[in-house]
Image (cartoon, helix red, strand yellow):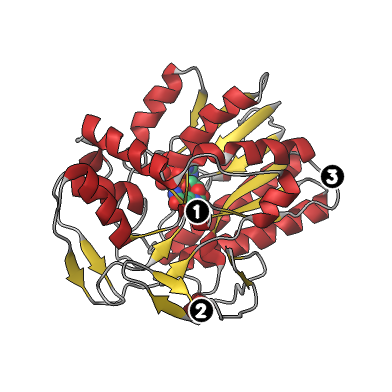
Amino acid sequence: MRILLTGICGFVGSVVARTLREQLAGSEVVGLDNLVRPGSEINRRRLREAGFRLIHGDIRLPSDLEGLPRCDWIIDAAANPSVLAGVDGKTGARQLVEHNLVGTLNLLELARRWNAGFILLGTSRVYSIAALCTIPLVSLPDRFAPDPAATLPGLSAAGVTESFSTTPPLSLYGSAKLASEVMALEYGAAFGFPVFINRCGVMAGAEQFGKADQGIVSFWIRSYAARRPLRYIGFDGRGRQVRDCLHPADVAPLLVSQMRAGQTADLPRIVNVGGGLASSFSLAELSAWCADRFGRHSIDTDLTPRPFDVGWLVLDATLAQTAYGWQPVRTRDAIFTEIADHAVRHPEWLPLSED
Ligand SMILES: NC(=O)c1ccc[n+]([C@@H]2O[C@H](COP(=O)([O-])OP(=O)(O)OC[C@H]3O[C@@H](n4cnc5c(N)ncnc54)[C@H](O)[C@@H]3O)[C@@H](O)[C@H]2O)c1
């Protein structure tokens, strides 16, 4: 089996490439990347050394895709992954749509031509900001938590499920990804190839190119270790907003199950993929963890609300567990420790990741 993995030189792509190779004996992973993300050239060198076939190309350009070898599966992990993309003054809205939607469309055309399966690395940011903001929260000393009495469509005791509202506004990033989901499912149905959408929550691990707007866990731990300025932004300025986290190596077994399942009927095509409540953390809790590891560092407060921010977003991944027997293995503390160890060994990593 040959797999085209776009965005292979990114954080998720590079980890998934290595893990797939271990878990899918006899498969070949061909990688495509345009190296737009600062730091991705480091992964290109390492992946080359590990024997991966890499092609420098851009998913926005159909001509860059013409000469690719035919593959049985396309895994789309190439994107601008920042929720602030298109409104951050650094990237244009149109550019974001070209990377995250037009690029996907070009890959769907390729899947149609090759009769290949297609897997989208989607995002939890497809869930409605307005609806997420209506989750009633209680304030615990170091984190927000949903009011246990809260009942909201699509919200379970384990978190946000796949049936939660996806009504915009979601962020330009979330909407481009949601539109990609719709088009992927439509192409799969129209042209008869398997499609899977994995709505991933926050992903984290040692070699993430962390920035304030993307790769927050890596950015926070590295900045804390280096005594760089950090701020709790928005809400009550105490860093009580909550996310869950997941290591991308834990995504790979799900991708393997989906590729094995192919067109098997009755399997959900859209699943949440997140670490869930067990891996959830607030920034205040992450700071406490960092203080234990590196000694105390003071955090500033900025009460200006941040666009598209929500107080609590934890994914209920029960559907992926029941349908595919999938379960994350790496715990939250194992992920934090992996990043902290890497930060100590590689203090140069944070500046390398900056624009
Ligand atoms: N990291 C997360 O927390 C997270 C969470 C949910 C979903 N995702 C999704 O996972 C995927 C991978 O994210 P990541 O964290 O590895 O991001 P990343 O920025 O580390 O990697 C993305 C890679 O894609 C490449 N790329 C970007 N635009 C491209 C284009 N037009 N053509 C070819 N290559 C291009 C970049 O150079 C980079 O190497 C994305 O689709 C993202 O939306 C990530």
Q: Mark 3, residues whose alpha carbon is within 10 Å: few (<14), some, or many (≥20)?
A: few
Q: Which mark is residue 264?
A: 3
N-terminal of the pair, mark 1 or mark 2, is 2
The residue at which mark 1 appears reads as 278
N-terminal of the pair, mark 3 or mark 2, is 2
Q: Is residue 91 above or below residue 253?
A: below
Q: Nearer the viewer, residue 293 or 186?
A: 293
N-terminal of the pair, mark 3 or mark 1, is 3
Residue 64 visible from this viewpoint: no
Q: Is residue 283 above or below residue 129?
A: above
Q: Is residue 34 above or below residue 211?
A: above
The residue at which mark 2 appears reads as 135
Disc 1, SS = helix
Distance of label 3 from label 1 (alpha carbons):
31 Å
Q: Which mark is residue 342?
A: none
**Disc 1 + disc 2, Cβ < 8 Å:** no
Q: Quadrant of residue 21?
A: top right
In the rendered structure, which amino acid carries the disc numbered 1?
A: Ala
Horizontal placement of 329 versus 185: left or right?
left
Residue 14 x/y as whole percent:
47, 33
Residue 69 x/y as whole percent:
64, 27
